[in-house]
Image (cartoon, grey):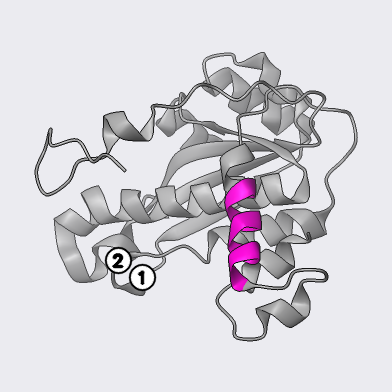
Amino acid sequence: MPFKALAKLGKKDVLKDVKGVQTREEVARIALSVLKSRTCVRRYSPKDVSDEFVKELIIAAASAPSAGNHQPWEFIVVRDPELKEQIVDAALGQTWMLEAPVFIVICINTRLAAATYGERGERLFGIQSTAAAIENMLIAAEAFGLGSSWVGSFSEPRVSLLLQCPDYARPCAIVTVGWPAERPKKPVRQPFEEIAHLEKFDNKWKI
């Protein structure tokens, strides 16, 4: 199912937009299937990713919730091979990244993050909001059949300098995007029974 259809889940006419789907529960299960199937991809085919796909990923990211609806995020798309090599060098030499045709560097706009909530907005809410945007991006990539990986290990000052970020735009993640050369095995997740608590901590919720 096209990602645009998934993006309309909250609209009353969603069932008209999704061919062959009869109920809202079916739509929800398709969306959940996409979410659960997402995994990090670190091997990519040489095939390029069109600007239209990249645009859709950024729009999906920018649909995330944010504290006070300040939307404290900025997205820098990097395709230039030389610049990508410099970013990889700043990312502790993770050369696998170079297989991806596109890097998207996500920055926190600290001015927006702090606009209403001050220091707590900058130090916590901005990070929470931007992380939600990144997760939206990863799920959107999965819906399109693209591979992606969230990279957090890099020198923030060096990446900021390479991308000529102003002092209020803090690089917090690099997302690699490309068509997967392989689909890695889904890592084992903690079972529901071990992580869900009812009313108080360590009162395991058993359903």
Instruction: Tell me the mark number nearer the camera, choosing from 1 and 2.
Output: 2
Dominant secondary structure (helix, strand or loop) of the stretch shown in magenta? helix
Which residue is pictured at 82% across the width and 71% down the height?
19
Which residue is pictured at 36% across the width and 64% down the height?
66
Residue 12 position by quadrant: bottom right
Under tag 2, what secondary structure?
helix
Report x, y in % for residue 180.
79, 31
Quadrant location, the C terminus: top left
Which residue is pictured at 65% across the width and 21% down the height?
185
Q: Which mark is residue 190?
A: none
Circle 1 sits on which residue? 70
Side of 50 where 172 appears, left or right: left
In this view, the residue farthest toward the bottom is 12
Report x, y in % for residue 10.
55, 76
Side of 23 where 79 appears, left or right: right
Report x, y in % for residue 188.
50, 21
Residue 157 position by quadrant: top left
Verify CB contact (< 8 Å) between mark 1 and mark 2. Answer: yes
Quadrant location, the N terminus: bottom right
**Which one is in front, 38 or 146?**
38
**Whole-Å distance between the Cαs marked 1 and 2?**
6 Å
Asked if residue 138 is positioned above or below residue 159 in the image, the reply reads below
**Which one is in front, 114 or 186?**
186
Asked if residue 148 is positioned above or below residue 29 in the image, the reply reads above
In this view, the residue farthest toward the right is 47
In this view, the residue farthest toward the left is 200
Whether residue 25 appears in magenta in the rendering, the answer is: yes
Q: Amino acid at mark 2?
A: Ala
Circle 2 sits on which residue? 67
Q: Which residues lie in the magenta part?
A: 24-34
Say whether residue 56 is visible. Answer: yes
